[in-house]
Image (cartoon, helix red, strand yellow):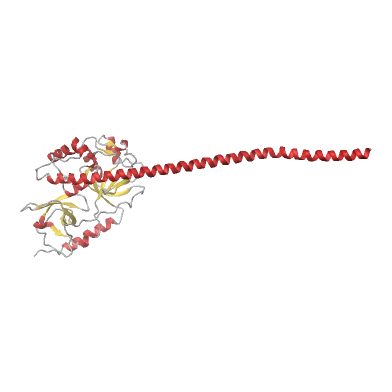
């Protein structure tokens, strides 16, 4: 009898991600642990300086206790793509994974994606278990990351760039400075440093200095938007393609050549056309590209609308500021005129007073003269 726990995670259920936005505007460097690297623009990491680290450790401990008593593996026929389950990992312990592809008949292993680490592995079918919902309370801890202000010098990232980046960050903790967020794609754009000390050279700058990456800060920004213009090759393969196995993280040269032959053609870049294929091993990639294209077009439309709205708001604010400045200038001019008028008045007052006093004295002298004249007569 199959040892299936109650309230197991169903096929159509997904594990939620860590919420974004809580780090927006935060200054300083955050300690992170990079768990997997596909390229400088595609890697996964965990936040070390947070309560998440302890929640994950507690989860692993509870899973180890639970599966010490639940020994029956999942029936191979139920291993469907997208299924979330538990796997006895190479790190000695039980981890949460998602099935990437349905294993063929009589297969002994299946490809899985570690939801808390962002990496793939081929796991023996006998080492997989159903996952109860009580182990989905905490979100997936693997966070999507991309280096900021860098871009590939070629159509795809050269192996030397990825290798150097991997060597710099994969063997210990790193420190990340948050530059931007893509909340729709759940990506953090970061500057990564080997130390928290001030003045340290970032890995981003190191790649640029070694001519393994271009300086993305030199690229223009979209009109009325804060979004940098990106090459299509920077967006593809997408994180979703990598995490679902549509683009294998260990893809061979033939697969990469086929992929490059699609995304680097004018028909794809300009018209977003995906060539039809009868190869069953490439149909998942074709479907993934079609799905990506739908989301990409939708995102472009939303960004365009947002850009227009932002431009309208900026124009309205600009007009308001101009009116305020004009009013302020008028007030200053009016104040200057009043001040000048007061100065003129102050200057005229003594002269006016002198005239008034002169008139009074003249009348007094006239009366005195008349009185004296009467006396002499």
Q: Nearer the viewer, residue 21 or 352?
A: 352
Whether residue 191 can be seen here: no
Question: Where the N terminus falls, by quadrant?
Answer: bottom left
Residue 156 image offset from top left, x and y in percent: 20, 38
Residue that sits furthest to the right in the current view? 377
Q: Nearer the viewer, residue 329 or 131?
A: 329
Q: Residue at x 20, y 38 (%)?
A: 271
Tally the marks. 0
Whether residue 51 can be seen here: yes
Q: Residue at x 17, y 46 (%)?
A: 288
Query: In the figure, is residue 2 to the left or right of 359?
Result: left
Q: Nearer the viewer, residue 296 or 152?
A: 296
Q: Residue at x 24, y 44 (%)?
A: 297
Question: Where the C terminus falls, by quadrant?
Answer: top right
Task: Give the image quarter of residue 154.
Answer: top left
Residue 354 image offset from top left, x and y in percent: 74, 38
Query: In the figure, is residue 220 to the left or right of 283?
Result: right
Vertical arrangement, residue 46 with respect to residue 8, above or below: above
Q: Residue at x 65, y 38 (%)?
A: 344
Residue 267 image offset from top left, x and y in percent: 18, 36
Vertical arrangement, residue 345 with respect to residue 125, above or below: above
Q: Nearer the viewer, residue 373 or 172?
A: 373
Query: In the figure, is residue 330 to the left or right of 27?
Result: right
């Amino acid at each position: 009898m199959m040892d299936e726990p109650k309230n197991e995670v169903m096929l159509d259920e997904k594990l939620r991600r860590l919420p974004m936005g809580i780090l927006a505007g935060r200054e300083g460097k955050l300690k992170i642990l990079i768990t997997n690297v596909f390229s400088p623009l595609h890697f996964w990491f965990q936040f070390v300086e947070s309560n998440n680290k302890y929640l994950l450790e507690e989860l692993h401990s509870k899973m180890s206790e639970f599966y010490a008593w639940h020994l029956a593996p999942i029936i191979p026929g139920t291993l469907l793509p997208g299924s979330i389950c538990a796997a006895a990992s190479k790190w000695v312990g039980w981890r949460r994974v998602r099935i990437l592809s349905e294993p063929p008949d009589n297969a002994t292993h299946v490809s899985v994606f570690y939801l808390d680490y962002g990496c793939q592995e081929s796991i023996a079918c006998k080492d997989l278990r159903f996952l109860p919902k009580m182990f989905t309370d905490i979100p997936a801890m693997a966070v999507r990351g991309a280096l900021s202000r860098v871009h590939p010098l070629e159509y795809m990232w050269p192996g030397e760039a990825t290798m150097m980046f991997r060597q710099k960050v994969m063997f210990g903790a790193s420190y990340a400075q948050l530059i931007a967020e893509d909340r729709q794609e759940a990506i953090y754009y970061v500057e990564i440093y080997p130390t928290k000390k001030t003045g340290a050279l970032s890995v981003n700058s190191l790649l640029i200095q070694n001519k393994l990456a271009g300086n993305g800060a030199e690229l223009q920004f979209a009109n009325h938007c804060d979004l940098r213009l990106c090459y299509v090759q920077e967006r593809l393969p997408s994180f979703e393609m990598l995490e679902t196995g549509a683009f294998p993280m260990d893809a061979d040269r033939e697969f990469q050549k086929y992929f490059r032959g699609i995304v680097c053609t004018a028909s794809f870049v300009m018209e977003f056309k995906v060539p039809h294929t009868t190869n069953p091993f490439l149909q998942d990639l074709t479907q993934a590209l079609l799905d990506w294209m739908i989301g990409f077009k939708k995102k472009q439309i939303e960004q365009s609308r947002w850009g227009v709205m932002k431009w309208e708001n900026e124009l309205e604010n600009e007009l308001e500021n101009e009116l305020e400045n004009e009013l302020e200038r008028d007030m200053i001019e009016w104040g200057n005129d009043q001040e000048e008028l007061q100065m003129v008045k102050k200057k005229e007052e003594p002269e006016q007073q002198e005239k008034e006093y002169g008139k009074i004295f003249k009348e007094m002298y006239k009366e005195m003269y008349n009185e004296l004249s009467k006396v002499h007569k």
